[in-house]
Amino acid sequence: MSIELNETALQRHFGAVSKVPVVIVHRSRVAADFELTSAENSLQSGFGSENRRDEYLVGRSALKSALAAIGKNQDTAAINWPSPFCSLSHSHGHAVAVSYGDGKGIGIDVQLLRMPSPATADRILSGQT
């Protein structure tokens, strides 16, 4: 399945398949008002490559917006993964964050240049609806 990578298309797609209201945020660059907490800065400084640091920043920018939309703490370093109320995936300069206020479980995986391995399905998919 292929979905256009922008918030409008993603919201339209997930709105059609989801029975609950899901917040979806797409970023390909850091938001203008974006700031890291000291804990997030510590995590980011540990990445060896500039590319990994850039992916972290774009991802955290998306995730902070998704968390704000459901009234959660925006310090992403405080999240225990997997989280029942948010998920984040990034690939090749794009990040998609999703959040769900009721905290019953949500997840997303974005793969832009390759198909995910079927062996990972049990980690990212659930039989529950």
Image (cartoon, rainbow, N blue to C red):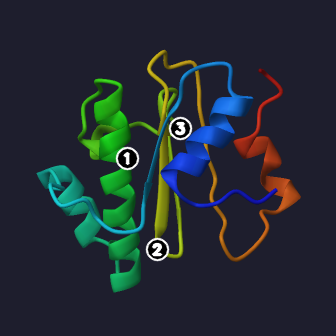
2 vs 3, front mark: 2
Say what amino acid the circle numbered 1 marks: Leu
**Mark 1 vs mark 3, CA separation in Å:** 14 Å
Observer-nearest residue: 117 or 15? 15
Q: Which residue is mark 1?
A: 63
> Which residue corresponds to mark 2?
93
User: Does residue 3 lie above or below 115 as drawn?
Assistant: above
Label 2 Cα neighbours within 10 Å, binned few <14 / some 14-19 / many ≥20: some
The numbered dot on residue 113 is none
- In the image, residue 110 lies at what x, y percent? 62, 59
Q: Earlier in the sequence, mark 2 or mark 1?
A: 1
Cα separation, mark 2 vs mark 3, equals: 22 Å
Q: Mark 3 — residue?
A: 82
* Residue occupying the far right of the picture: 118
In terms of secondary structure, where does tag 1 sit? helix
For badge 2, the amino acid type reads: Gly
Give coordinates of residue 84: x percent, y percent: 52, 27
How far from the left and from the top, in percent, is residue 9? 60, 50
**Mark 1 or mark 3, whichever is nearer to me:** 1
Q: Is residue 115 left or right of residue 111?
A: right
Q: Position of residue 117 (x, y in %)?
A: 82, 63
Q: Quadrant of the N terminus?
A: bottom right
Q: Amino acid at mark 3?
A: Pro
At x 73%, y 31%, the residue is 17
Q: Residue at x 34, y 35 (%)?
A: 67
